[in-house]
């Protein structure tokens, strides 16, 4: 079973930047190549439900949550089996455990999280 491993979480000051990475341990999982998966970043902060932050489909088209759209950018590098989230102008509300996920479609990422392939998460803490 392939694994998704996040990194890049850290403590940061408000207004700062962080870049999260998510790398797959295998070029394929569940019978499909990494490049054929829609990928996404989710986050969950204490006492709140997990929410999607940014999604990217197999063609590289991204969808970013409106509340962070001007500050966050999602990209993927299929050759490196990696997904990235560039976060700029961080705010304390961005503090959360961030997870990457893979699914066969963006619809599945959002609507069937129980079927997603998940990473273990990386913590982002933003102080004011």
Image (cartoon, helix red, strand yellow):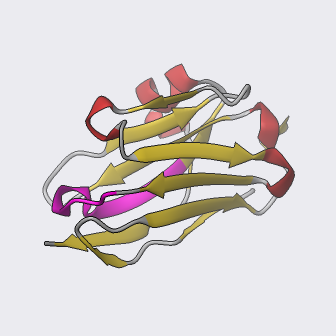
Left or right? Give the position of 58 relative to 33.
left
On the image, the x and y values in percent for residue 24 come to: 73, 58
Q: Please tell me whether residue 96 belongs to the stretch shown in magenta.
A: yes
Left or right? Give the position of 19 relative to 28.
left
Please report the bounds of the magenta region as a residue range.
Answer: 89-100
Residue sitting at the far top: 107
Q: Is residue 17 above or below residue 114?
A: below
On the image, the x and y values in percent for residue 61 come to: 62, 26
Left or right? Give the position of 69 relative to 59.
left
Q: Quadrant of the N terminus?
A: bottom right
Q: Please tell me whether residue 107 belongs to the stretch shown in magenta.
A: no
On the image, the x and y values in percent for residue 109 come to: 51, 31
Query: Could you tell me which residue is drawn at 74 percent across and 57 percent down?
Result: 2
Q: Quadrant of the C terminus?
A: bottom left
Query: Could you tell me which residue is drawn at 31 percent across and 76 percent down?
Result: 12
Query: Could you tell me which residue is drawn at 27 percent across and 64 percent down?
Result: 15
Left or right? Give the position of 101 relative to 30.
left
């Amino acid at each position: 079973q392939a694994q998704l491993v996040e990194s890049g979480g850290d403590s940061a000051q408000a207004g700062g930047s962080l870049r999260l990475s998510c790398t797959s341990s295998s070029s394929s999982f569940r019978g499909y190549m990494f490049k054929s998966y829609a990928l996404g970043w989710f986050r969950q902060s204490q006492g709140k439900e997990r929410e999607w932050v940014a999604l990217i489909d197999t063609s590289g088209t991204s969808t970013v949550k409106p509340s962070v759209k001007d500050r966050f950018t999602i990209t993927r590098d299929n050759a490196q089996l990696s997904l990235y989230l560039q976060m700029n102008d961080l705010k304390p509300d961005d503090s959360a455990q961030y997870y990457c996920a893979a699914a066969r479609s963006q619809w599945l990422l959002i609507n069937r999280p129980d079927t997603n392939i998940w990473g273990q998460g990386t913590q982002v803490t933003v102080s004011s």
